[in-house]
Image: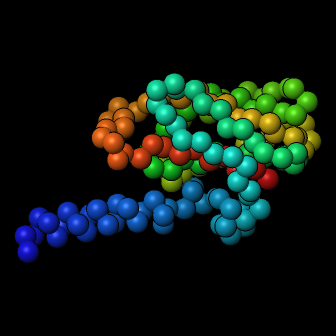
Amino acid sequence: MNFKLIVAGALLTFGLATPALAAPGGYGPNHGRHSQWELVGSTQVSFRTERDTVRVRGYERHRQIMVCVYNKPVRFLDMDVRFGNGRSQDVGVRSVIGAGQCTRAIDLNGRNRDIRSVSFAYKTIPGFRQIGRFAQPATVRVYAR
């Protein structure tokens, strides 16, 4: 068999397995002392709108949130958390979150809050645009506790 085909197959297999093995920044729902994090919503980043909103289900109260990114890195500019009482909290993230990584734990103002939605403003990263019809978009997941 051709050596290039073997190497290409190995790299493809490793590339497909890596996102499944990647721990989201040491956090996430089943990660050691941070096991109390709960997935409250997710969205696939389109890179066409450069603004997306994750709607949070239920009427649960949380004191912190964390945003994790999968498949492709995303450059976050701003994040706005909307609460059940109509108020909001502006969070300046202003950083690139790599694939398989998470933001820090972000404290919510006040006591436990009922989160309705989390909106993101972001920019595309050169070289990571969706190319081809089988390219996976970036997935953004919001965890809360």
Q: Is residue 113 left or right of residue 128?
A: right
Q: Residue 98: give x, y in percent of width and height.
A: 48, 46
| Colouring scheme applied when the structure was drawn | rainbow
What residue sits 53% from the left and 45% below the top? 139
Residue 87: x percent and y percent? Answer: 86, 26
Q: Is residue 57 visible?
A: yes
* Count of numbered tags: 0
Residue drawn at x 28%, y 62% as measured from the top left:
12
Where does the image place residue 141, in percent across and percent down from the top left? 62, 47
Q: Residue furthest bottom?
A: 1
Q: Is residue 37 left or right of residue 52?
A: right
| Picture residue at 87% right of the left edge, 41% below the top | 114
Query: Is 70 left or right of 125, judged from the image as shown?
Result: right
> x%, y% of residue 135?
36, 45
Quadrant for residue 113, please give it: top right
Q: Residue furthest left?
A: 2
The residue at the point 73 percent across, 49 percent down is 40
The answer to whether one can see residue 77 in this image is: no
Question: Quick check: 15 left or right of 1?
Answer: right
Which corner quadrant holds the N terminus? bottom left
Vertical position of residue 66 compared to residue 2: above or below: above
